Amino acid sequence: METGVSAAGLHRSRLVLLLLLTASACSPMEDAAPGPEPLARRPQALKELHTSNGLSLNGLSLNGLSLNGLSLNGLSLEGLSSARFHAWFQTNPELHASVMEYLVRCAAPAEESRTYTSPTTGQTWSWRGGLGLAPDWTQGSPATLAEQRIVSACLAAHVDKYELHISISVQGLSAQGVAIPTPDWELALYSEKEACFFGNLFTPEGVYAGNDGRPLNERESTARACALSNKRDAGGHPCAPLLRVEQDCARFCTLDASRRFYVSCTHNGISYPAITTRLLRSEIYTCGDGVCQVSEKCGTGEAYDNCGRDCGPCP
């Protein structure tokens, strides 16, 4: 793959960041509600952000990776321009192009992109960087164990059960120990602590998620069901191969010095680098708010999976 820097892409990123900061008033800590949330939830604006820069401004990102995208069997660890990468990519170009969109966003720096041209068909794909968690690997070096694990955690954080594009705030350390920049206004706007993610998709170790903070009550739900569980779902695995750890993150993960995110989580005797996510409050839905959300079901009650008030009775 080739590395490229798009001046137009950087200009768009700066314009979007200016819009976000302007929308959230002079002091982002005063009133977070008017921030980028309406922009992120409008279908056309969401499409523009997703196609132009993926909303990767500091730690902001759009999730939506399919669960099938967590199967990385055959993906080369020897760099992204090898014959092994071509063989892996061509087994399922549509799915693997989606995987690469998120992998490059997680691994490469925001100012860079990666381009791949199929030697057999001549078709070209291009993916933009974002979080910069494994820049050495995306430059062509073999992936280290630390890079495998942090990229795995990042991919898991971007999985969405319903394959929707929902903006999230992502925190963590790169494989080189550099923190993802997270300004105070981002923490204020993305006020809901969501989950911790860790593991290794490149080995049989698997990937895991745990609740960071309160589980949702029986009336609440979210399209981010792979990350933030309901009390009634505790211990379940609705998003296999992503597995849920029954304990809250704070019980088995270590916070960074600022106490804003987890730097590592220990599971099955292994200490993994971790990714921590935060969510807009509006992405948590409540049965009774008058809208039948994707995570709610018809019925006669007021629980999210029996929500007659929003979704009506079942046929």
Image (cartoon, grey):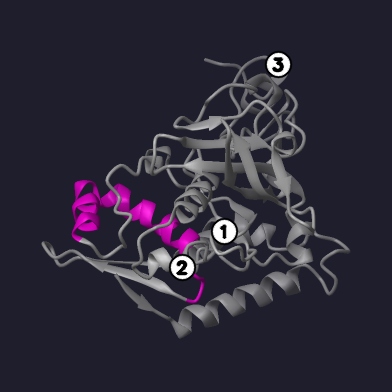
Q: Nearer the viewer, mark 3 or mark 1?
A: 1
**Circle 1: residue type:** Ser
The image quarter in which residue 78 lies: bottom left
Q: CA distance from mark 3 to mark 1?
A: 35 Å
Residue at the bottom extreme of this rendering: 7
Residue with the mark numbered 1? 61
Residue with the mark numbered 3? 301
Q: CA distance from mark 1 to mark 2?
A: 17 Å
Numbered label attached to residue 135: 2
Camera-nearest residue between 213 and 50? 213
Residue 218 in picture, x, y percent from top left: 72, 23
Q: Quadrant of the N terminus?
A: bottom left
Question: The residue tagged with tag 3: helix, strand or loop?
Answer: loop
Q: Residues within 10 Å of mark 2 (few under 14, many from 20)?
A: many
Residues at discs 3 and 2 in contact (Cβ within 8 Å): no
Residue 273 in picture, x, y percent from top left: 58, 49
Residues at discs 3 and 1 in contact (Cβ within 8 Å): no
The image quarter in which residue 4 lies: bottom left
Return the disc, 3 or 1, that comes first in the chain's sequence.
1
Please give the name of the residue rendered at 44% of the width and 56% of the height, measured from the top-left corner.
Answer: 102
